[in-house]
Image: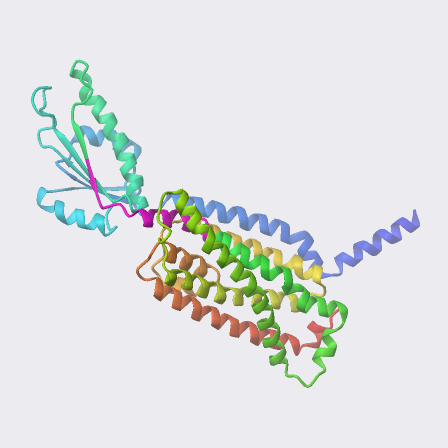
Amino acid sequence: MKNIKTIFKKEFDRVMKDKRLIFTIMFLPGLMLFLVYSFIGSALENATTKTPYHVAIVNPVVEFMDIYEPNETDYILNVISISEDDVDEYQARIDDEEWELLLYFDDSILTYDGTGDKPVIWIYSNQNNMNSSAVYSRFVRYLSQFQATLSYDLYGDTTFFTLQFDGTEVDQNLQIGTMISSIMPMLVVMFLFSGAMSIGPESIAGEKERNTISTLLITPVKRSEIAIGKIFSLSMLSLLSAVSSFIGILFSLPKLLDIQGSSYAIYSVLDYLMILALLFSTVFVIVGAISIISAFSKSVKEASTMVIPLYILTILVGITSLFNSSITENPFMYILPIYNTVQTLSAIMTFNPRVVLYLVITICSNLVYLGLFVYFLEKMFQSEKIMFSK
């Protein structure tokens, strides 16, 4: 019994006296669960409480308002009444994705008695805009209920009025690009990170564990040169993963688009070059972060464990493309690492007119992060407490 107690105390003290193990075992699992579920909850809440949908109606009818108003709120839906003279203006706003829906009610819709020409309700939407498509579907259902209500007294005639659909010319390439951009950024970020994670901890933490890092540090080579050499060598190796991901995208997208019946030429050579440049700049950020964690760790196992939360966080950032199909127009958001890659990649795939600006900001900010990682890694190499800790 005494021997069991001794072994138990030895193993228990080994963990409890190591602050890193305490954090990894006791706090990290709960913290990651909290962050993951909080993020998913916030993302779902943001996805369901966006900016109100805007609907303009010519000749609105109270009876129709009584149908949709109980199911909508002012926060979700902004409905205004406009005159016939404003129709062209709101058509243009819908085409420019500044408005979602336009309804034009025949002024004689409530006086129809079942004889003569049926009244017409004209609907104008933009099927290239997901918000417009969403509110369009909702109002078509409301109009079906309105149709049933008005047709009740027509003795079997179920078409009290005629629906006339019109809208912005559908851009098939944009719709397919929007579909692809919802999943591809997350996959690309995952592939890049997994490639860097497989070699990063071994390069620095592995040398610390084998005590070969001390031989390198006592050489006349500057610590800054060691840091730069480490990051760039790891980055070049990880770039092979980036190239592999790029080639996978290059060949998979046309096949996917062919299944959808679209042309192989939906993306130009310039689009693919922008994707490749984006992957190259992003991998430097990922490798830099993994290098810092590896230098701080005592072993490859510890480094791999400490990298996992960053990997999960990266996946969560990539998932944002699933919950939000719109591209942020705030240039400052493209300074945020990884998030800028997700947004820029989505912008490329959805043919955003400001994609060049987003790409330049993303690449420049990623290079700045690379410089910061090199600086901090150099300082860590100069610290004997960090590099020779046991």
Residue 182 visible in this rendered orientation of the protein: no
Magenta-colored span: 165-185
Q: Is residue 225 left or right of residue 70?
A: right
Residue 281 visible in this rendered orientation of the protein: yes
Check the image and report above or below for 144 versus 364.
Answer: above
Please tell me in which quadrant of the rendered image residue 274 appears. Answer: bottom left
Please tell me in which quadrant of the rendered image residue 61 appears. Answer: top left
Q: Is residue 32 left or right of residue 256?
A: right
For the point 55% across and 72% down, the residue is 373
For the point 66% across and 79% down, the residue is 382
Check the image and report above or below for 187 versus 228.
Answer: above
Q: Position of residue 316 (x, y in %)?
A: 51, 52
Nearer to me, 85 or 241: 241
Q: Is residue 158 left or right of residue 347?
A: left
Model colouring: rainbow
Q: Is residue 171 magenta?
A: yes
- Location of the C terminus by quadrant is bottom right
Q: Is residue 314 magenta?
A: no
